[in-house]
Image (cartoon, helix red, strand yellow):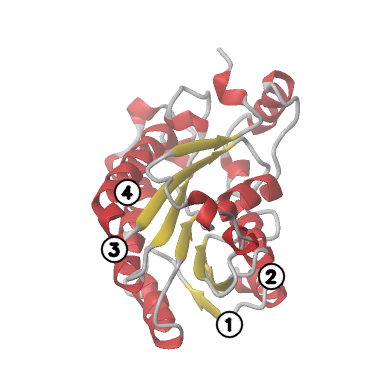
């Protein structure tokens, strides 16, 4: 009934978007994918970011490492063109990208600018939709898509502000994509980690206070790590997750169940 290979990713090809450094959630996921046997394509935001990402890509033995700023026309498409040329297929793709202008992120949602809200939605949500569209023809034998969210998409988290409704839109997009691509064997997941001290999270006001509050109130009585998130995420790409799709899964030590 069961095979050891059902919990492995040997021979699988995957794309990871969003590694900034060795503290990134995307890096935790990439490490877990690689640990289970997958081969990876890795991207970096810019030439300025490349020195932080290249050593990690080397450590992960990634044969494809390319720039990908989703704001730059053609860069995401170029990544998929390289994957098509080198591999001819794709088994999973992880989107761990989010951005909002500081002036909009640090203010009230009601005061956010139209331009800032639109930019946050494009980078944090619509780029996942574009990724899924580009991945679809390469997943002819099925595959797995991932987006990263946060509890602030469901409940009000002080200081999360603009990103709350943006991540809520991302979560809804994943559900619709799971429905649309399900007949092709392509699954889509939202992973919602607890707060982790990443470079992106450092842009939130009062983030240290949030970390303390979660560590105190979560049933597990501790904060999650990028490794915790990574291993769960990677397992969903194995046969263990073959009939799971469209789900929002919290990896937060149970914090989300608290009133």
The numbered mark, 4 or 3, whose residue comes first in the sequence reads 3
The residue lying furthest to the top in this view is 259
Q: Is residue 163 above or below residue 140?
A: above
Tell me the residue that label 1 is attached to.
63
Q: Residue at 63% across / 42% down in the picture? A: 202
**SS at circle 4:** helix
Mark 4 burial class by Cα count in 10 Å: few <14, some 14-19, many 20+: many
Tell me the residue that label 2 is attached to.
56
**SS at circle 3:** helix
| Distance (Cα) linking label 3 and label 2 | 27 Å
Q: Is residue 75 above or below residue 177?
A: below
Q: Quadrant of the C terminus?
A: top right
In this rendering, the label closer to the viewer, 4 or 2: 4
Percent across and percent down for residue 196 are: 66, 41
| Distance (Cα) linking label 4 and label 3 | 12 Å
**SS at circle 2:** helix
The numbered mark, 1 or 4, whose residue comes first in the sequence reads 1
| Distance (Cα) linking label 1 and label 4 | 29 Å
Q: How many marks?
A: 4
Percent across and percent down for residue 136 are: 31, 66
| Distance (Cα) linking label 4 and label 2 | 31 Å
Q: Quadrant of the N terminus?
A: bottom right
Tell me the residue that label 4 is attached to.
178
In this rendering, the label closer to the viewer, 1 or 4: 4
Percent across and percent down for residue 232 are: 61, 47
The numbered mark, 3 or 1, whose residue comes first in the sequence reads 1
Tell me the residue that label 3 is attached to.
133
**SS at circle 1:** loop
């Amino acid at each position: 009934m069961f095979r050891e290979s059902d919990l492995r990713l040997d021979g699988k090809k995957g794309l990871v978007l969003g590694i900034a450094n060795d503290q990134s959630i995307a890096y935790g996921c990439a490490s877990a994918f690689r640990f289970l046997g997958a081969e990876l394509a890795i991207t970096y935001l810019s030439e300025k970011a490349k020195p932080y990402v290249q050593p990690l890509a080397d450590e992960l033995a990634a044969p494809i490492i390319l720039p990908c700023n989703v704001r730059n026309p053609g860069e995401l498409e170029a990544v998929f063109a390289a994957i098509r040329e080198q591999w001819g297929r794709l088994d999973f793709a992880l989107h761990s990208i989010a951005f909002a202008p500081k002036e909009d992120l640090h203010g009230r949602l009601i005061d956010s600018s139209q331009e800032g809200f639109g930019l946050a939605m494009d980078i944090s949500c619509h780029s996942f939709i574009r990724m899924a569209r580009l991945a679809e023809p390469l997943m002819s034998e099925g595959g797995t898509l991932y987006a990263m969210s946060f509890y602030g998409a469901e409940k009000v988290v002080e200081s999360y502000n603009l990103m709350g409704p943006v991540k809520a839109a991302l979560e809804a997009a994943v559900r619709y994509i799971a429905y649309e691509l399900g007949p092709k064997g392509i699954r889509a997941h939202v992973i919602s980690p607890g707060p982790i001290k990443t470079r992106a999270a450092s842009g939130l006001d009062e983030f240290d206070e949030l970390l303390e509050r979660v560590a105190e109130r979560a049933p597990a009585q501790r904060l999650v790590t990028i490794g915790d998130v990574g291993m769960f995420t990677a397992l969903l790409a194995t046969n263990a997750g073959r009939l799971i799709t469209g789900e929002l899964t919290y990896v937060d030590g149970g914090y989300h169940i608290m009133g």
